[in-house]
């Protein structure tokens, strides 16, 4: 029987390259079915389960990593730092450092990461930038000794459960959990190992239940007490009712798993099933709704350390530790219910599970329960049972059972109770819906039906619609539509008058129907309905379903112009070219038929464009629709004719119409309209305005000018001139404005326009001699024709306009006007008058320049003075007056000194040629702007003293640089006499007279910047040493010394002695710098200023002494002189500085002496390094003791201990270590140990209880017992290993075994122990060690495995016994390899078989004869996975075990490809086929071609024709033709008959008959011919019999093949060959059959008998045709079209519109299938004429 779970291995991590050491808790994680993440030593491996287990390795250093369950977001942990990365965006999302170490972490949702520390639980959200938030503190039951293995959050995010395990009494593992409510902030401790949340749907409740499923195992419980499973609802609102809770159910734990405990609990949310996986590899499956255990099995031998559910399928994934097996457990729904019923024998559980999950297997249970409920009269229970049974009981028989139950008084009918229960649980099926509808409709309650249909509670069908149809057509239509009853739905549309919905619906569902008949019926009875239907037919998807032209003719024949128009509008809306004729007719029938407004509306919409436009244009013109006619004409003559009536047209239309014409047509039409009089003037102007760009301004102007329409031209150009960029337009507008006296417009355009050609306009205006010259003034002013304008105005005596021009129009052009007036010889008084009128608005500089060039400057003096008098500060005015005063010598010096507004750059050059001194004054007035000119005039004319004074007073370093550096740069090393004279004037006269410190400072800086040190020294000595107000100036003294340092170092010492007020520190630093290296001078400065008379403060004196000794030791490197100076000073900082220098110069002993004198331990690190390097331990100890007085440093105490150790002072070492100290005992102990100071190291390690290192010290001191004792205290595998190996080398085997037992407890070190024993040759001892190891309480698989390997090498007799006893505790693959290396094949076979590696077991037995065992081989061969091994086994048995071959094939019959075996047998030889004869007969039932052919060959070889015939009859799958061909020449008759039979079976009639003829097997010939049913073959055989005179055979053939022989052939052959008697039976039978057939035909064709009711039925039949009698329309598929009705006379005797030519222009189009070209039905019996 199939089990209710499906277990399979999804993949193996080791096969994907993940190392074994990384497959464990904390290193490998699986948060969902998308990713597995493994942390390896130097990388992180990502396995994409959604992409074929693709492996990606990233070089990331991390301790742990977990992937988000939904998105590609990876969380990494290293120490206490957690980082989150988005792999898709390749960016870091968040990072945080946790205050304490993490012990567990997990993604609780796509946006939340839970972090568990030793004391609390935190949640870290990805949706914001906040750090992790503390949720709750860990309960005291989950203390520090508890290992956290799981954490989960409820679906609503309000409950959390934290679980962990800890060591219990007697080797048990206790489980503790903490349930926490986030809303209430309370915790509840639980005793158990695993828990999870689930959301389930409880029967009878609308809201889902959020339950906690957990395992409980109390530590105080008895060993035999089973654990329990709890299921209880949490977080339910009490107002909604009591929470869901199940009583605890016992978990059936196997007898051999008493110490087992759960490691995880996963919920299959899809099926509401909980899975518990235990440490020993058991899986338990529970039903959450009942809490019952449904299945238990052991699925793996290894521990499962991580699990996760797969939400899409409900499966559970798990990973085994180290092996890396990723397995998948999923519910086997097909087997669950049968398993519960047959194995658990819990029918109630089976029914509930089958009902909830919809699983098969409970049908019989449902039936039995149903009968029980019905028998007991419990109708409600029976109804609920049927509702929960799926489709098992929902049959008509069940409905009948409920209908047969009598109703109880006061209660509803049982059948209604049944239907009510079904409606609550879901949807009724078809039969149930019908049975419910019958009584509901009978009771007149259609609203219930409507509600159920709206809620989709009923299954719609045609029968249900038929029930509803008489009562409610709308509801019936809804039912028909849902049930896809298309014909009935269309009938409903017709009955409801919804004709427009018929075609869309029929098209959407692909329903075919006869629209033509329906349309013809509606046309006579309901024209509007016919129109709606016709519209739908022509608008159907995929093209019209009727002939448009024929339908239109039908409407028109009934004089339905309006309907015809509406239909054609719908039919022609796609505006196709092939409908041009119909478009024309549509417009024509409305234009001629008295509805031109309809045609106008159609044309207005523009939906038709392919009609005959000229024809329609004529009709529009005839109807007086001038605008429409114009729209349809293209010839200009037609257009001109229509536009004779343009006064009746809309002006806007006329204007827009010109946009459709080309340029030539537009101009011609405009000329024509203009020629008809001024009434068209306005509209022509509008046309010209709008199409100005298209028609061209020149031609439009020409049209207006030809018709002398100056006013129209003016208005046209006035509208476009502001936007036009055509100079012609602007010129013509100016011209038109002047012609019409519109001078304001002319002036405006001349003033504002930039487009016209100024020369052209100027020439026109000058020639026009306008009374108002303002347009000309604007043109000349804008385009700089001022001279021409002045000349024009002056010569035409328009002087007042000259004055107006310069005063109001353009005062800035006054200089040009005045210049031209000068040239024309105008009156000076007039010029002065206009200048005074212009005043300050006239540009002075330009006017002065013009006056100067004409030598009329003095003429401007009154105007200039008037400007000054009015307060003018313009430089040009004052410059001009200055020039006049200088020229007239009217006190120029006073003007230059006192005037503040002239420009020195203008008057300075003007004065140079007249008086250089005036030029100097003018330049000096420039306040620095004319410095270069001032310097040049001073140097040129020898004004050195003035220049020197000016330079000192200016205090401008840039100006100084120009003077001092200018000539030096140009002349090189040669001294410049001008510069020399200038410097002399500065030193001797200018500077000594100055009392301003800033002037002196700036002068000194200038000399410094000019790099004139010699001159600077002289200057400074003159100021400082020769006595002045600045002799004690510190800056000047500093400058003097610095200048001497740079220029003349020999003077520095003297200056130091003479000067006292300078910056000693700074000057000394400059002296000792690398640039100058004046060390003695620097040392002298420090010594001089360290004396009390120069430095009063004691600290400053010491600082100077330190700096002085620093010069000696740092620069002069004279340590002896420095030591002497330090002795003189005897100050601690001085000694400290000396000590540092001695330390740097590698004199550690002297440095230690100096530091001791200074009592300075600050450089203890350097001293320690130097002492270690120089190994001066004796001198070093006093320094360390001095340092310990002021410092408590780890390094000092550590080095003191090391110094004691190096000097062998063990006593003081012990005293120091036992006293208070801050030494790093561990570090110094390791150092002593590494240098071989084991005695000292022993004391140190003893002090800190480092038993691991202490044990190693004992080893080196050969104290082995003490080493074992220390290792026992250390209890560290590394220590145990070192002691073990040391004892082994010392041949202390007992002690070595004691240590070795502790080492081999750790699997990682087993190989090393074995290797060490083996390298030393102690094989017996190592075997004994592992034999003791298997008795350890915590013995692991590695011990048993390694013992097995050792047995294969050294004690082979024990191998098989060991494998059988301890198979479950072996690493099978490793032991097998060892057995194979030792050639111990029987144990290897045993292990392979026990490990279910049957492929390898079979291979060994095939390849190794000693391993052969037939029973084992047959047991294994059927279990191999590689089918190729089976074929190797076949070959092996054929060659080595032929007598057992048949038995092998019996075993392999169901697992092997028999065709391939046959091929293998053929390759082996014929004897192999003979050997396999029994096997081939046994597998012939599969009807395989190779098997059949091989057997047939064997039968032929054995001449067993009966068996061959039986084989051919039973099995047809072989090459019949080849076999028949082979047997056709066989020497035995029976085989040749078989050949003919095979040909016959393969329908090779001719070959079969020929073979039978040759063997004279006449019966075979006749049977074959009859079977062929081929008259030719039969006739040939008959003729053969006639030719060979086989009369009896001829007669037998006639009898046998009677049905296939033509009577004329039989009669002919019988008559020719005289076989009258032999052919007579055939003829008699033929006549009998012929007579019978004629009789039957007469009966079928006889006319029916008449009765009285026949006429009424015929009338009724005709009454239902063509819509007569008001019957239902015929909706079946038909081939009829719309018949052409006869012409219907119009009211009043008219005949309507003549449509005789409606279909003439086009070829007749075919209508619906079966219609004639004119749309009518073909008459019965009509055939096309050829």
Image: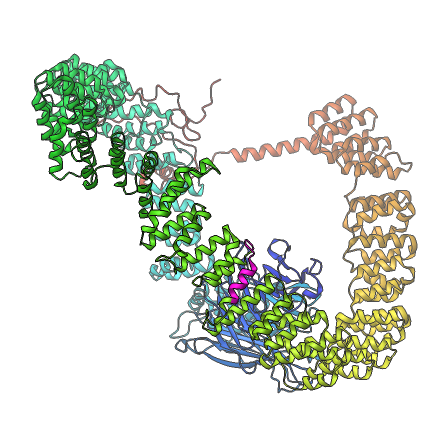
- Judge by depth and name the residue closer to the eye, 1369 or 491: 1369
Residue 454 as seen in the image, left or right of residue 1614: left
Question: Where residue 1532 sits in the image (x, y, percent)?
Answer: 90, 38
- Judge by depth and name the residue closer to the eye, 834 or 1583: 834
Residue 371 as seen in the image, left or right of residue 1551: left
Q: Is residue 1594 visible?
A: yes
Quarter residue 984 falls in? top left
Residue at the image position 75 percent from the left and 70 percent from the top: 1308
**Secondary structure mainly formed by the magenta segment:** helix
Q: Is residue 102 visible?
A: no
Residue 1239 located within the stretch drawn in magenta: no
**How is the rendered protein coloured?**
rainbow
Quarter residue 734 falls in? top left
Residue at the image position 78 percent from the left and 25 percent from the top: 1583
Residue 1085 located within the stretch drawn in magenta: yes
Question: Where residue 900 sits in the image (x, y, percent)?
Answer: 20, 41
Question: Where residue 189 sits in the image (x, y, percent)?
Answer: 53, 81
Q: Is residue 1563 above or below residue 1061?
A: above
- Judge by depth and name the residue closer to the eye, 1599 or 467: 467
* Residue that extends furthest to the front in the rendered view of this protein: 1026
Question: Range of the magenta residues?
Answer: 1074-1087
Residue at the image position 71 percent from the left and 64 percent from the top: 20
Q: In which quarter of the image is the N terminus?
A: bottom right
Quarter residue 214 falls in? bottom right
């Amino acid at each position: 029987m199939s089990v209710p779970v499906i277990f399979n291995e999804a993949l193996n991590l080791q096969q994907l390259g993940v190392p074994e050491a990384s497959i464990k808790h904390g290193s490998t994680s699986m948060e969902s079915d998308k990713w597995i993440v493994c942390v390896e030593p130097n990388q992180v491996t990502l396995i994409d389960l959604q992409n074929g287990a693709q492996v990606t390795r990233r070089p990331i250093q991390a301790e742990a990593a977990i992937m988000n369950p939904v998105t590609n977001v990876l969380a990494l942990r290293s120490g206490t730092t957690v980082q989150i990365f988005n792999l898709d965006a390749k960016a870091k999302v968040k990072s945080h450092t946790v205050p304490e170490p993490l012990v567990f972490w997990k993604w609780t949702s796509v946006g939340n990461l839970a972090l568990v520390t030793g004391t609390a639980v935190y949640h870290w959200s990805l949706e914001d930038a906040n750090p992790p938030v503390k949720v709750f503190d860990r309960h005291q039951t989950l203390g520090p000794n508890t290992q956290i293995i799981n954490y989960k959050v409820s679906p609503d995010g309000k409950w959390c459960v934290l679980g962990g395990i800890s060591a219990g009494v007697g080797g048990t593992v206790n489980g503790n959990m903490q349930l926490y409510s986030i809303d209430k902030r309370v915790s509840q401790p639980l005793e158990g190992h695993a828990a999870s949340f689930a959301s389930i749907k409880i029967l009878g409740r609308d809201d889902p239940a959020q339950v906690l499923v957990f395992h409980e195992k109390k530590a105080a419980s008895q060993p035999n007490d089973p654990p329990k499973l709890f299921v209880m609802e949490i977080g339910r609102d009490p107002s909604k009712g009591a929470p869901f809770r199940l009583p605890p159910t016992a978990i059936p734990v196997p007898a051999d798993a008493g110490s087992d405990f759960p490691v995880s609990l996963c919920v299959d949310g899809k099926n509401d099933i909980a899975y518990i996986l235990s440490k020993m590899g058991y899986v338990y499956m529970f039903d959450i709704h009942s809490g019952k255990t449904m299945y238990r099995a052991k699925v793996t031998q290894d521990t499962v350390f991580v699990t996760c559910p797969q939400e899409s399928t409900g499966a559970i994934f798990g990973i085994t530790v180290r092996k890396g097996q990723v397995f998948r457990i999923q519910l086997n729904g097909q087997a669950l219910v049968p398993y519960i019923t047959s194995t658990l024998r819990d029918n109630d559980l089976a029914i509930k599970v089958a009902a909830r999950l919809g699983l098969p297997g409970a049908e019989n249970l449902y039936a039995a329960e149903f009968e029980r409920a019905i028998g007991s009269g419990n109708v409600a229970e029976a109804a609920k049972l049927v509702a929960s049974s799926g489709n098992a009981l929902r049959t008509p028989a069940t409905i009948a059972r409920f209908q047969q139950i009598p109703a109880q008084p006061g209660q509803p009918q049982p059948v209604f109770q049944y239907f009510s229960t079904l409606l609550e649980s879901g949807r009724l099926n078809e039969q149930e819906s019908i049975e419910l509808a019958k009584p509901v409709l009978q009771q007149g309650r259609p609203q219930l039906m409507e509600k159920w249909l709206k809620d989709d509670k009923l299954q719609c069908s045609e029968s249900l619609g038929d029930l509803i149809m008489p009562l409610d057509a709308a509801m019936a239509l809804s039912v028909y539509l849902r049930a896809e009853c298309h014909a009935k739905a269309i009938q409903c549309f017709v009955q409801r008058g919804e004709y427009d919905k018929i075609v869309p619906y029929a098209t959407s569902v692909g329903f075919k129907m006869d629209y033509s008949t329906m349309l013809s019926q509606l046309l006579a009875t309901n024209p509007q309905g016919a129109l709606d239907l016709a519209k739908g037919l022509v608008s159907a998807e995929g093209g019209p379903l009727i002939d448009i032209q024929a339908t239109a003719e039908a409407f028109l024949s009934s004089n339905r112009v309006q309907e015809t128009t509406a239909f054609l509008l719908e039919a022609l809306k796609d505006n196709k070219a092939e409908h041009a004729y119909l478009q024309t007719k549509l417009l024509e029938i409305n234009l001629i038929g008295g509805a031109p407004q309809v045609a106008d509306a159609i044309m207005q919409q523009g939906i038709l464009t392919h009609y005959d436009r000229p024809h329609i244009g004529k009709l529009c013109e005839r109807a007086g629709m001038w605008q429409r006619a114009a729209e349809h004409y293209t010839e200009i003559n037609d257009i001109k004719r229509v536009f004779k009536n343009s006064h009746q047209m809309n002006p806007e239309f006329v204007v827009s119409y010109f946009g459709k014409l080309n340029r030539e047509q537009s101009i011609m039409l405009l000329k024509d309209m203009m020629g008809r009089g001024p009434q068209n003037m306005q509209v022509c102007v509008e046309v010209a305005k709008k199409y100005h760009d298209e028609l061209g301004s020149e031609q439009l102007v020409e049209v207006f000018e030809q018709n002398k329409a100056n006013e129209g031209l003016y208005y046209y150009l006035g509208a476009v001139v502001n936007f036009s960029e055509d100079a012609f337009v602007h010129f013509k507008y100016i011209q038109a404005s002047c012609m019409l006296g519109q001078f304001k417009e002319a002036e405006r355009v001349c003033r504002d326009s930039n487009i016209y050609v100024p020369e052209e306009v100027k020439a026109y205006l000058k020639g026009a001699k306008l009374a108002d010259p303002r347009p000309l003034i604007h043109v000349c002013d804008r385009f700089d024709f001022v001279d021409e304008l002045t000349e024009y105005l002056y010569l035409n005596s328009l002087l007042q306009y000259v004055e107006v021009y310069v005063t109001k129009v353009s005062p800035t052009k006054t200089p040009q006007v005045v210049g031209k007036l000068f040239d024309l010889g105008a009156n000076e008084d007039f010029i002065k008058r206009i200048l005074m009128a212009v005043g300050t608005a006239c540009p002075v500089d330009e006017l002065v320049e013009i006056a100067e060039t004409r030598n009329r400057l003095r003429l401007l003096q009154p105007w200039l003075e008037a400007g000054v008098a009015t307060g003018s500060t313009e430089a040009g005015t004052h410059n001009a007056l200055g020039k006049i005063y200088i020229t007239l010598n009217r006190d120029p010096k006073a003007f230059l000194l006192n005037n503040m507004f002239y420009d020195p750059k203008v008057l300075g050059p003007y004065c140079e040629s007249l008086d250089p001194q005036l030029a100097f004054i003018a330049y000096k007035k420039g306040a620095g702007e004319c410095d270069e000119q001032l310097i040049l005039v001073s140097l040129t004319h020898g004004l050195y003293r003035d220049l020197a004074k000016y330079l000192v007073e200016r205090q401008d370093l840039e100006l100084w640089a120009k003077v001092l550096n200018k000539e030096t740069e140009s002349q090189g090393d040669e001294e410049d006499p001008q510069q020399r004279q200038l410097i002399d004037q500065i030193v001797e006269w200018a500077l000594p007279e100055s009392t301003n410190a800033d002037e002196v400072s700036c002068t000194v800086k200038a000399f410094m910047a000019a790099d004139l040190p010699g001159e600077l020294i002289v200057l400074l000595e003159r100021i400082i040493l020769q006595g002045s107000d600045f002799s004690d100036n510190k800056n000047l003294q500093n400058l003097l010394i610095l200048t001497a340092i740079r220029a003349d170092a020999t003077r520095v010492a003297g200056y130091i002695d003479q000067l006292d007020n300078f910056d000693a520190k700074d000057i000394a630093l400059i002296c000792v710098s690398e640039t100058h290296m004046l060390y003695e001078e620097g040392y002298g400065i420090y010594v001089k200023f360290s004396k009390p008379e120069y430095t009063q403060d004691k600290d400053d004196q010491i600082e100077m002494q330190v700096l002085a000794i620093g010069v000696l030791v740092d620069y002069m490197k004279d340590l002896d002189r420095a030591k002497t100076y330090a002795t003189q000073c005897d100050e601690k900082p001085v000694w400290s500085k000396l000590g540092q220098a001695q330390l740097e110069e590698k004199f550690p002993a002297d440095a230690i002496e100096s530091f001791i004198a200074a009592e300075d331990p600050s450089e203890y690190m350097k001293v320690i390094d130097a002492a270690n390097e120089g190994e001066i331990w004796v001198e070093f100890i006093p320094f360390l003791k001095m340092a310990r007085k002021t410092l408590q440093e780890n390094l000092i105490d550590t080095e003191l201990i090391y110094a004691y150790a190096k000097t062998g002072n063990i006593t003081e070492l012990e005293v120091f270590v036992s006293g208070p100290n801050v030494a790093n005992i561990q570090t110094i102990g390791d150092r002593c140990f590494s240098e071989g100071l084991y005695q000292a190291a022993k004391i140190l390690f003893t002090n800190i209880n480092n038993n691991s290192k202490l044990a190693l010290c004992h080893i080196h001191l050969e104290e082995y017992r003490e080493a074992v004792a220390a290792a026992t205290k250390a209890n560290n595998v590394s220590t145990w290993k070192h002691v073990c190996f040391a004892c082994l080398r010392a041949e202390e085997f007992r002690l070595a075994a004691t240590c070795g037992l502790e080492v081999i407890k750790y699997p990682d070190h087993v190989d090393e122990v074995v290797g060490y024993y083996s390298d030393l040759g102690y094989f017996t001892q190592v075997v004994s060690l592992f034999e003791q190891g298997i008795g350890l309480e915590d013995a692991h698989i590695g011990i048993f495995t390694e013992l097995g390997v050792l047995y294969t090498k050294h004690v082979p007799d024990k191998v098989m016994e060991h494998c059988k006893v301890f198979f479950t505790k072996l690493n099978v693959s490793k032991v097998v390899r060892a057995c194979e290396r030792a050639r111990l094949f029987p144990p290897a076979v045993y292990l392979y078989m026990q490990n279910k590696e049957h492929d390898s077991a079979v291979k060994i037995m095939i390849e190794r004869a000693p391993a052969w065992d037939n029973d084992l081989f047959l047991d294994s061969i059927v279990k191999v996975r590689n089918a190729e091994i089976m074929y190797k086994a076949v070959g092996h048995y054929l060659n080595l075990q032929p007598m057992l071959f048949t038995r092998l094939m019996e075993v392999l019959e169901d697992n092997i490809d028999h065709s391939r075996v046959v091929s293998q047998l053929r390759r082996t030889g014929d004897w192999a086929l003979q050997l396999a004869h029994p096997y081939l007969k046994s597998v012939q039932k599969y009807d395989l071609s190779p098997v059949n052919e091989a057997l047939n060959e064997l039968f032929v070889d054995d001449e067993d024709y009966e068996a061959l015939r039986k084989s051919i009859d039973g099995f047809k799958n072989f090459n019949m033709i080849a076999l028949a061909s082979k047997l056709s020449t066989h020497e035995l008759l029976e085989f040749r008959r078989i050949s003919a039979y095979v040909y016959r079976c393969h329908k090779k009639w001719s070959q079969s008959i020929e073979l039978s003829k040759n063997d004279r097997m006449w019966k075979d010939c006749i049977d074959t011919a009859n079977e062929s049913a081929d008259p030719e073959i039969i006739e040939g055989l008959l003729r053969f019999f006639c030719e060979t005179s086989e009369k009896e055979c001829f007669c037998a053939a006639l009898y046998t093949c009677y049905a296939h022989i033509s009577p004329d052939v039989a009669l002919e052959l019988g008559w020719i060959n005289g076989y009258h008697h032999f052919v007579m039976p055939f003829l008699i039978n033929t006549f009998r059959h012929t007579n019978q057939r004629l009789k039957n035909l007469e009966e079928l064709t006889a006319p029916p008998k008449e009765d009285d009711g026949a006429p009424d039925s015929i009338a009724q039949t005709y009454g239902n045709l063509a819509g007569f009698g008001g019957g239902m329309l015929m909706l079946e598929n038909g081939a009829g079209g719309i018949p052409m009705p006869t012409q219907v006379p119009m009211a009043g005797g008219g005949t309507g519109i003549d449509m005789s030519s409606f279909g003439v222009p086009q070829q007749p189009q075919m209508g619906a299938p079966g219609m004639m070209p004119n749309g009518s039905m073909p008459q019965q019996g009509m055939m096309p004429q050829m």
